[in-house]
Amino acid sequence: MISFLDLKKINEPYETAFQEKLKSVLENGWYILGKEVETFERAFAEYCHSKYCIGVGNGFDALVLIFKGYIELGKLQKGDEVIVTANTYIASILAILQADLIPVLVEPRLETYNINPDLIQEKITPKTKAILAVHLYGQLAEMERINAIAEKNNLIVVEDCAQSHGVNANSNIFKSQISNSGDLARNLKSKINNLKSASAYSFYPGKNLGCLGDGGAITTNDSELAKVLFSLRNYGSEKKYHNEFIGVNSRLDELQAGFLNLKLPNLDTDNEKRRTIAKRYLAEIKNDKITLPFWDFSNNHVFHLFVIRTENRENLQEYLTQNNIQTVIHYPIPPHQQKAFKEWNNLSFPITEKIHREVLSLPISPVLNDLEVDFIIEVLNQY
Ligand SMILES: *Cc1c(COP(=O)(O)O)cnc(C)c1O
């Protein structure tokens, strides 16, 4: 069986180093907010071309704390509306709600699975105060357009980078890759991590940069926001037993930070391996029944997932299973049709619904080998 994502194989090369790291943390005898977290925060900030990185408990908390931070700074207020793509993973939407803000769903583009900037303006009301841009499946959302809309309407832009570690890391490579695939490609080309915004990362084991448990981080260039966030994640206290804000306990674990310090140096190489596989899928899968995802072949995609569309999805998934290829559906039910959101169940988002009906994620990861890719392509072409 070709597994969808072989996490054991991904972490195997680090086994000895992980054990040494555990030993060193044990010898240090300091388990919360120690040297490993500090080192990781410095390294990850630099990697993301950001001034600050704040390690937190998970990706969901990273999003919630960004919103809470802006509320503490008076830049957002409870009840403000936040624009978000309707087909995102539910965590993006739950995080907005958790911060007492109101998610406003906008349809994505069928080609990129990311929010369609053409549809944002009509959803903006006097209560709209932010856009949560999700770089879904690892592809950069159309940040140039999104930032322009935000600027025009005086909105904060927050980025959900839980699936896109490294997409904005090499901004110089990014800028030098001039693609010729038209307007859509040009729209995608923009440097993110701008001065006013903040980005949320998850280090859940299956993400492009994953630890051995839960973990997350926020990056930002905003020193005021960073100061509030360093405090909010730690009971709202910067100085022990002096509480400035109503904070939470959401700290990146010292041991997990230690593991991440070992894995971060390989993130670019791992993402490049994912892109190499994506290139082969795009060039070699030739089947009228399968729609391949849009990519302009620049570094604006880190292929957390390779998501195809097909009309008779259950049929294709069953065929692949019979051929020993494991696939996953990201995601089977759109957020607005979930039981948890009863008041949205009658809303209609045709593009989102089509995506949730037709998408199927093929295996893609730094440890998927050439023979496995050959086989997956061959099986798909015979479908
Ligand atoms: C994984 C994910 C999150 C949440 O991250 P956790 O670490 O699981 O809390 C948020 N948004 C998106 C798009 C994700 O894929």
Image (cartoon, rainbow, N blue to C red):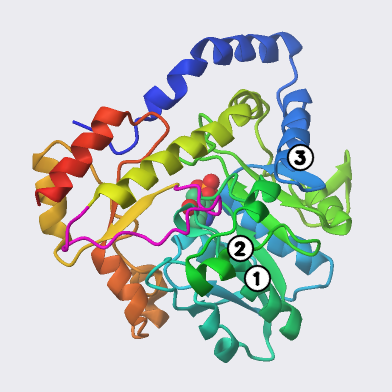
How busy is the neighbourhood of tag 3: few (under 14 within 10 Å), some, or many (20 plus)?
some
The Cα–Cα distance between marks 3 and 1, rounded to whole angstroms, is 22 Å
Q: Is residue 345 magenta?
A: no
Q: Nearer the viewer, mark 3 or mark 1?
A: 1
Q: Quadrant of residue 288?
A: bottom left
Residue 79 coordinates in the image, percent (x, y) = 66, 79
Q: Amino acid at mark 1?
A: Glu
Residue 292 coordinates in the image, percent (x, y) = 30, 59
The Cα–Cα distance between marks 2 and 3, rounded to whole angstroms, is 21 Å
Look at mark 3 in the image and give the residue it sits on.
Answer: 46
Q: Amino acid at mark 3?
A: Glu
Residue 148 is left or right of residue 209, and the answer is right
Could you tell me if the residues under marks 2 and 1 are in contact, i.e. CB atoms within 8 Å? Answer: yes
Could you tell me if the residues under marks 3 and 1 are in contact, i.e. CB atoms within 8 Å? Answer: no
Please state, as top left, top right, bottom left or bottom right, where the N terminus lies in the image. Answer: top left
Look at mark 2 in the image and give the residue it sits on.
Answer: 189
Look at mark 1 in the image and give the residue it sits on.
Answer: 144
Secondary structure under the numbered disc 3 in the rendered image: helix
Q: Nearer the viewer, mark 2 or mark 1?
A: 2
Q: Is residue 292 magenta?
A: yes
Name the foreground residue: 59 vs 180: 180
Residue 48 coordinates in the image, percent (x, y) = 70, 45
Residue 256 is left or right of residue 183, and the answer is right
Residue 133's disc number:
none
Name the foreground residue: 8 vs 190: 190
The residues colored magenta run 286-303
Mark 3 CB lies closer than 8 A to ligand 1: no
Please say if 334 is above or below 351. above
Please say if 15 is above or below 210. above
Magenta portion: prevailing SS class: loop
Residue 70 is left or right of residue 188, and the answer is right
